[in-house]
Structures are given as structure tokens and as C-alpha cells.
Image (cartoon, rainbow, N blue to C red):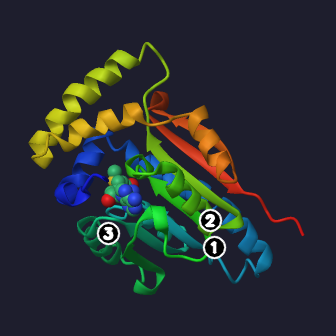
Amino acid sequence: MAYDFNKIATSYDRLNHIMTAGMDRLWRRRAAKEALKTARRKTASATNALTHSRTNAFALDVACGTGDMAIELLKRGCAVTGVDLSEEMLAIARRKTASAGFQLSTFNFQLANAEALPFDDASFDAVTSAFGIRNFVHLDKGLAEMARVLKSGGRMVILEMSTPDSALVRPFYNLYTRRIIPWLGSRIAGNREAYTYLPNSIERFPKGEAMLQKLEAVGLRAEQHKFFFGVCRMYVCEKNELMC
Ligand SMILES: C[S@@+](CC[C@H](N)C(=O)[O-])C[C@H]1O[C@@H](n2cnc3c(N)ncnc32)[C@H](O)[C@@H]1O
């Protein structure tokens, strides 16, 4: 069963920024930029780039949570749909995005399961997910759905936490994730259990080559970028253009 994020929705953002010392913001910014690269190229050639300074692209953010990735995509001028399983997280996403001043017609947050996305094939120019896929019950199903709704030639970008590769960094990582994060979770979110689940789920989750193989299995070309000793990984994927 998926972890219920309704329980930690109100403290989620604060704890996230504290735990990563604010780096999560930089990682999302980088992911949004990567996700829209091909969308930008395509709209520039398909339309008059002088009259369309914005991308005119449609992006989907899966497991959008409180909307931080959607906001990064909106800042870059595309329209965004965010989906999540938690109504509490979605409510915060709607409030935050509206108060950041984005036009209501450019974003939409809706309750939906990543493993059965309610969209037609090839509906989106870009698909993103930040720190969401680790929580899917059936990872392969979720990845296949994300790839299905992506247009050919579009990009899918995934951010996910992972364990560092270096044996030198590992003891510090273990101390931080096994002692400090659960303590922060109990102090700030009043929920030690959720933040004990976090390092355990990271430990069990496929990373690097194993993840690249999963992405290739759903028809994407994928590469990974490591941030902060590999504690966070970004998978940048492209769906091949259909040959006519
Ligand atoms: C760690 S939060 C990440 C939130 C946000 N993307 C961010 O950048 O902070 C994980 C989110 O995944 C959502 N989630 C988990 N399983 C899901 C699924 N199968 N479909 C949609 N959302 C899911 C949870 O409800 C939660 O909001």
C-alpha cells in the first residue's frame, strides 16, 4: 500500500527544505529546465519564436505533492497538470500556485494514480516527477504510464533520492538518514515513523544502472546525473521520435 502523505502534508515543505539544506529547490529547477529542452526546440521551430517567447508546451508533473515542481515548470512558461494521490498535498499545491500569481488557466492539480493516468497516449510535451516514484506500489506500471502519456520526441525527467556510491561518504549518509532525519521528523512533523520510512525506502529503491534499465524497458532513452555524491539522482529520458 502507498504511504499516506496526507499525514505529513502541512509540514512537508518545511522539513524537505531543512533536510536537504535547500538543495531540493536547485534540483527541481535543474529538472524543470531539462524537461522543457525539447519542448522549447519544437515550439521554436513550429511557431514564430519572436511572437511566442513562452514555450506553449503542456507538462505533466506526476506525484506533484505540494506543487514545487509544477511551479518551476510554470515559471518556464508552460501549462502544467499535476497529479497526486493525496488530497491534502494537492490542496496546498493549488493554494501555493495561485498565490505565486500564475494564471488559473495555466495549471490544474487533480487526484489521480500514477499507475493508471487518466490521460490519452501522447498528451504531454514533458513529464516530470520529483521524489515521487519511490512511493509507487508498482514502479514499472507507473513508469510505463508516464512514458505512455509523453509525446514522441518529448522528455521525461525524474528526480529521486538514492544512496551514495562512495564508501567514504556512506557512514555520514547513514548517520544522517538513520539518526538525524527521524529526529527532525519527530520534532518538526511530529511523525518519526514517516521519516524512518524515508531512509528504508531509499535503501530498497533501484538506482543508477538498474533504474536506467527500467526506463529503457518502457521505451525511453535515459541517462543519469548525480547530485551531492549521488544522494539525489536525476534521470533525463527521451521518447524516440516516430519514424515515418
Ligand atoms: C515525497 S512526495 C514528493 C512531492 C513533490 N513531487 C516534491 O517535489 O516534493 C511523494 C508524493 O507522491 C505521491 N504519490 C505516491 N504514490 C503515488 C501514486 N501512485 N500516484 C500519484 N501520486 C503518488 C504522494 O501522495 C506524495 O505527495
| Quadrant of the rendering where the C terminus is positioned | bottom right
- Residue nearer the viewer, 23 or 133: 133
Q: Secondary structure at mark 2?
A: helix
Circle 1: residue type: Asp
| Identity of the residue furthest to the bottom in this view | 105
Mark 1 or 3: the one toward you: 1
The quarter of the picture showing ligand 1:
bottom left
Where residue 156 sits in the image (x, y, percent)?
60, 57
Where residue 163 sits in the image (x, y, percent)?
43, 29
Left or right of 180, for residue 27: right
| Identity of the residue furthest to the right in this view | 244
Q: Earlier in the sequence, mark 2 or mark 3?
A: 3
Mark 2 or 3: the one toward you: 2
Where residue 242 sits in the image (x, y, percent)?
81, 65
Q: What residue is rendered at 45% in x and 86% in y?
A: 105
Which residue, given by chain and number where applicable, does mark 3 sit on? 93
Which residue, given by chain and number where applicable, does mark 2 sit on? 148
Q: What residue is rendered at 26% in x and 68% in y?
A: 92
Q: Is residue 68 visible?
A: no
Q: Secondary structure at mark 3?
A: helix
Spatial CA distance of label 2 from label 3 is 25 Å
Q: Earlier in the sequence, mark 1 or mark 3?
A: 3
Q: Quadrant of residue 191?
A: top left
